[in-house]
Amino acid sequence: MPKLDLKKEFKYLYAPSAKEVVLVDVAEMGYLMVDGVGDPNTSQEYMDSIEVLYSISYTLKFMLKKSAAVLDYGVMPLEGPTIERIHAFIDEHGYKRRGKHHEIYLSDPRRTAPEKLKTVIRQPVE
């Protein structure tokens, strides 16, 4: 059976520009997520959740929704300004936010230096 590599098969979903916010259509599929708040740099609950998600990540699939997306590099405290950029893009283009934003971790924070972390940040829109 051939290996399924969702990052290759759906490259447009996992490799948005780091310089500009873009719109992507996310195919309808099931997915796993952790819903939380707080500082992921210091939260044991976050690290435990990531451990579980990485253990079963081969089953991840995403639902069909239009989202604004951008690739974020580096330490997680910088995600705030990135999310603000996405929200500004949505407002400027006449869309409305729908639900919570999504963070798709392309790097394993257990094995990657903070400055090398890659995260796709998406905000569903309508």
Image: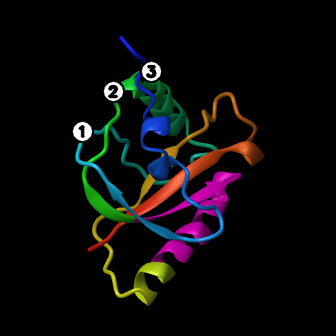
What element does badge 2 sit on? helix
- Residue type pointed to by label 3: Ser
Q: What is the CA distance from the residue labelled 2 to the residue labelled 3?
A: 10 Å
* Residue ID for mark 1: 30
Q: Is residue 16 left or right of residue 100?
A: right
* Image: 3 above or below 121: above
Q: Is residue 73 left or right of residue 68?
A: right
* Image: 26 above or below 42: below
Residue 55, numbered circle: 3
Q: Extreme top residue here?
A: 1
Q: Nearer the viewer, residue 77 or 39?
A: 77
**Highlighted range, magenta:** 68-87
* Residue ID for mark 2: 59
Q: Are marks 1 and 2 in contact (CB under 8 Å)?
A: yes
Badge 2 density bin: few <14, some 14–19, many ≥20, Cα 10 Å: few
Q: Earlier in the sequence, mark 1 or mark 2?
A: 1
- Residue type pointed to by label 1: Gly
- Image quadrant holding the C terminus, namely bottom left
**Residue 8 position within the rendered picture, expressed as x and y whole percent measured from the top left:** 49, 36
Q: What is the CA distance from the residue labelled 3 to the residue labelled 1?
A: 17 Å
Q: How many numbered marks appear?
A: 3
70 within the magenta span: yes
- Residue type pointed to by label 2: Thr
Q: What's the residue at 59%, 68% (across, down)? A: 82
Q: Are marks 2 and 3 in contact (CB under 8 Å)?
A: no
**Residue 87 position within the rendered picture, expressed as x and y whole percent measured from the top left:** 46, 77
